[in-house]
Image (cartoon, grey):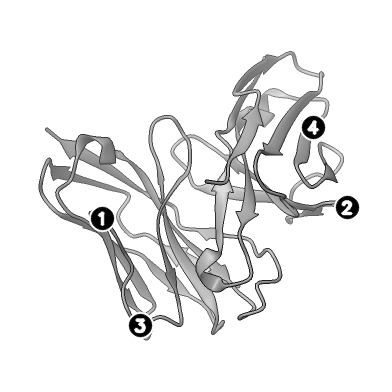
Amino acid sequence: AQTVTQSQPEMSVQEAETVTLSCTYDTSESNYYLFWYKQPPSRQMILVIRQEAYKQQNATENRFSVNFQKAAKSFSLKISDSQLGDTAMYFCAFMKHDGYSGAGSYQLTFGKGTKLSVIP
Amino acid sequence: GAVVSQHPSRVICKSGTSVKIECRSLDFQATTMFWYRQFPKKSLMLMATSNEGSKATYEQGVEKDKFLINHASLTLSTLTVTSAHPEDSSFYICSARVGGGYISNYGYTFGSGTRLTVV
């Protein structure tokens, strides 16, 4: 079984500054995905960024980037130029994959979340 | 992008009655749908996994007879909370896998959630 740990229940950052949210995971799987999801006050889950475990290059999506350390089983999210709209709960999630076939729909394992507040 | 439409967004029901929550995939076929429950300020807890045309798989501790899941088509999955009680009050979210084939297309999309209040 997989576990995902987010050790920061709450964080705050000044608008336009940079913040890093931490996530560690434990698994014996070799093929997997890692995700960061955002849940704003509307409660809609929104995909922020995705990382395939076989890729060494860290994923980036505009102001969002990850630091993926596979050996350390660490997957942190960096938000640059923080905006008020970034205020939300952020969940780190793990999903195993069966390789290149694309078959199967494996469940996501979520961390407990980090509540991020962007301060004007 | 792929969208899952979830209804209703809010529902209040009397104790002892049943409530149905629907999730529809609007522009893709959802072979598998996941149902989550979320308590205030908590993470998502997987309740069950539904596969089109077959019985749902429930997580340990989730009552199958209370939370009935039906996945009759590739675009519709429903969760029925039967004989609801105040302790069933919660936020329920569905999610479907999107893409497949190449790993780079893999992901999940979520419904907007249903806030259930049992009085």
**Mark 2: amino acid:** Lys
Labels 3 and 2 within one chain: no
Residue found 33% across the figure and 74% down from its top = A68
> Which residue shows up at 61% across the image and 55% down it?
B98
Q: Chain of mark 3?
A: A
Kind of residue sitting beneath label 1: Asn
Task: Name the subunit of mark 2.
Answer: B
Asked which secondary structure carries label 3, the reply is loop
Q: Nearer the viewer, residue A92 or B102?
A: B102
Other residues around mark 4 within 10 Å, as few (<14) / some (14–19) / many (≥20): some
Q: Which residue is mark 2?
A: B55
Task: For marks 2 and 1, give the one nearer the viewer.
Answer: 1
Residues at discs 3 and 1 in contact (Cβ within 8 Å): no
Spot occupied by residue B53 in the image (x, y as percentages of width and height)? 89, 51
| Sequence-first disc among 3 and 1 | 3
Q: Chain of mark 4?
A: B
